[in-house]
Image (tube, coloured by chain):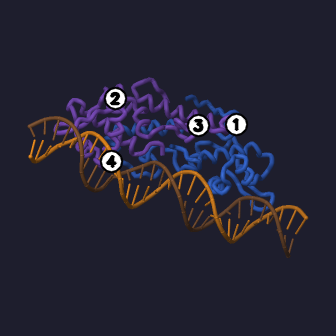
Chain colours: A purple, B blue, C orange, D brown
Amino acid sequence: MLISTKGRYALRVLVDMAERQAEGYIPLKEIAERQEISEKYLESIVKELVKNEVVTGVRGKGGGYRLRKTPEQINVGEVLRYMEGSLSPVACLEDGAAPCERSARCRTLEFWHGLDEAIRSYTSGYTLADLVQTGQPGNDYVI
Amino acid sequence: MLISTKGRYALRVLVDMAERQAEGYIPLKEIAERQEISEKYLESIVKELVKNEVVTGVRGKGGGYRLRKTPEQINVGEVLRYMEGSLSPVACLEDGAAPCERSARCRTLEFWHGLDEAIRSYTSGYTLADLVQTGQPGNDYVI
DNA sequence: TATTTTCCTTCTGGTATGATAGGTAATAGA
DNA sequence: TCTATTACCTATCATACCAGAAGGAAAATA
């Protein structure tokens, strides 16, 4: 499993926010109800989105969360990487992974690199706007 | 992490066997030493390969394991699916997963389907022969 | 001041991962 | 027939991650 509920829920939350951009700040409680996800669990997810400057939160009455950029500026691959830490298919390609001392003679490394690149180029071909509008990528990425 | 050590080690074991096809049956102990992987752990991995008819084992002196098909006939994606159970990036696309009752209005489903397909088409574009020879895919798959 | 909301820290039950341990069954060769 | 070798089988274990739940503190509004 490449993507856990963290990544999946994060996208659903962002789509929800994008569809209600005009309404200003939206309480997490509302999003949790609409998306049928535990509000407490969503807290930990949104926290990560705040930390990475994808959304902003405002406390108190009338507060809530809203997108910090336009949906067109929010890249899906980037968001998933925030949530999952990494989208690398294997441990040896993860950021900050100790370089494998077998890599020079590893016959599978190139295969993994290719898979990593396939995932990277697919996911970074989508923005939040693509998800909201049609569910189709808006750029020229072709599978 | 899409691929655990099970899938990674399985490929290394298979490449090792492919490179020594002419030598007949190869004891797991040798493979474990060459690949620097715990023999006991490899047992559980090879067991799965036997179960899925990728390799055959013969007991006793002079015994060991060998490929059951030619490297050209062994598909990398298939092997990884045996080892990992599934290569689906998200739980909702896994084989036998309960169909999500939100799927009709899910704005992210198509994105996940595309990612699933990207992974599937990349991994199934490689055979064991490709890993052994050059580390490059032998078919016309283009990223 | 009361209410609403984010924000922060801690805890928990379940499951998967990456092994290790110890044995049984089959086979070949001396 | 005995012994060494090898695959095969079952059980156990430490650790980490997943998916939340709980309880409160801080800020903002009315």
Within-10-Å neighbours for mark 2: few <14, some 14–19, many 20+: many
Identify the residue at horizontal 77%, vertical 53% (top origin).
Answer: B25
Q: Is residue B20 above or below residue B139?
A: below
The residue closer to the viewer here, A79 or B84, is A79
State yes or no: discs 4 and 1 in contact (Cβ < 8 Å).
Answer: no
Q: Residues within 10 Å of mark 4 (few under 14, many from 20)?
A: few
Mark linked to residue A112: 3
Q: Is residue A18 visible?
A: no
- Tell me the mark number nearer the camera, choosing from 2 and 1: 1
Please check whether the numbered discs 2 and 1 fall on a single chain: yes
Residue at the (73%, 54%) spot, across then down: B29
Q: Amino acid at mark 4?
A: Tyr
**Label 4 with label 2: CB-CB less than 8 Å:** no
Which residue position holds label 1?
Answer: A105
Q: Chain of mark 2?
A: A
Quarter where residue A62 is shown: top left
Give coordinates of residue A94: x percent, y percent. Answer: 53, 37
